[in-house]
Amino acid sequence: MGPPGAGKGTQAVALAARINGAHISTGDIFRENVARQTELGQTAQRYMDAGEYVPDEVTNAMVADRLAQDDARDSFLLDGYPRTLDQVAKLDEILTDLGSTLDGVVALTVVEDELIGRLLERAKVSGRSDDTEDVIRHRQDVYRTETEPLLAVYRDRGLLIEVDGMGTPDEVGKRIADALPA
């Protein structure tokens, strides 16, 4: 978890490989559907372009389906989900139905000016339509309102592992590895 630009995607790929688990990224799934111009992709694109979250019912169904696939049975890493308190409740239901639990929730912390700079740079490199400065600033506000409250939920459950997300990807990756239980 972490605000947009914190490096979640970069770190999630490396951590999923480390735990030999499925990397389940809602953003990747949305972008794949956008590229293929599926109905989900067209719906998701409207929300993503505005810096809004894709509606929970669409996201929840997609995650439930993905978690039920064979490669996620033993180990998985969620990247970009849950993002709302309602999604936390739905994830709890999905995991109960699958007989699974969360081992931990890694939250990356990065100062806002750094986040905005990273996302503007990413926009230059990748050409993502959802990385304009106005949309980036709006996404930061949406994160603070919708997702930041989840940190308290996972902290109360004893699952939250907060990691400084400042620095190079290798430095942050080492901090994550050091913070995780053996």
Image (cartoon, grey):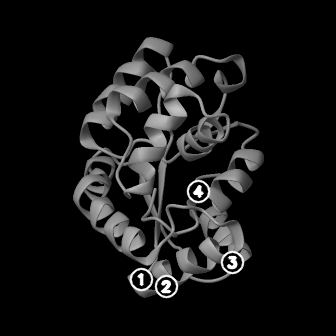
User: Up-down: is 113 above or below 124?
Assistant: below
Which amino acid type is marked by label 3? Glu
Looking at the image, tell me whether mark 4 or mark 2 is earlier in sequence order.
2
- Which residue is disc 1 drawn over? 111
Residue occupying image coordinates x 62% and y 57%: 9
155 or 51, which lies in front? 51
Q: What amino acid type is highlighted by mark number 2?
A: Glu
**Cα gap from disc 4 to disc 2, whole angstroms:** 25 Å
How far apart are the alpha carbons under marks 4 and 3? 15 Å
**What residue is pinned by disc 2?**
114
Q: Is residue 159 visible?
A: no
162 versus 153 height, above or below: below
Mark 3–mark 2 distance (CA, rounded to whole Å): 16 Å
Asked if the residues shown at circle 4 and circle 3 are in contact, with their CB atoms under 8 angstroms apart, the answer is no
1 or 3: mark nearer the eye: 1
* Left-right relation of 1 to 137: right
Q: In the rendering, at what x and y percent does residue 122 appear?
A: 63, 73
Q: Is residue 60 above or below residue 25?
A: above
Q: Are marks 1 and 3 in contact (CB under 8 Å)?
A: no
Give left or right: position of 109 versus 12.
left
Q: Which is nearer the N-term, disc 3 or disc 2?
A: 2
Q: Mark 4 vs mark 1: which is more N-terminal?
A: 1
Q: Is residue 11 left or right of residue 14?
A: left
Q: Which residue is mark 4?
A: 180
Residue 162 image position (x, y, % from top left): 44, 65
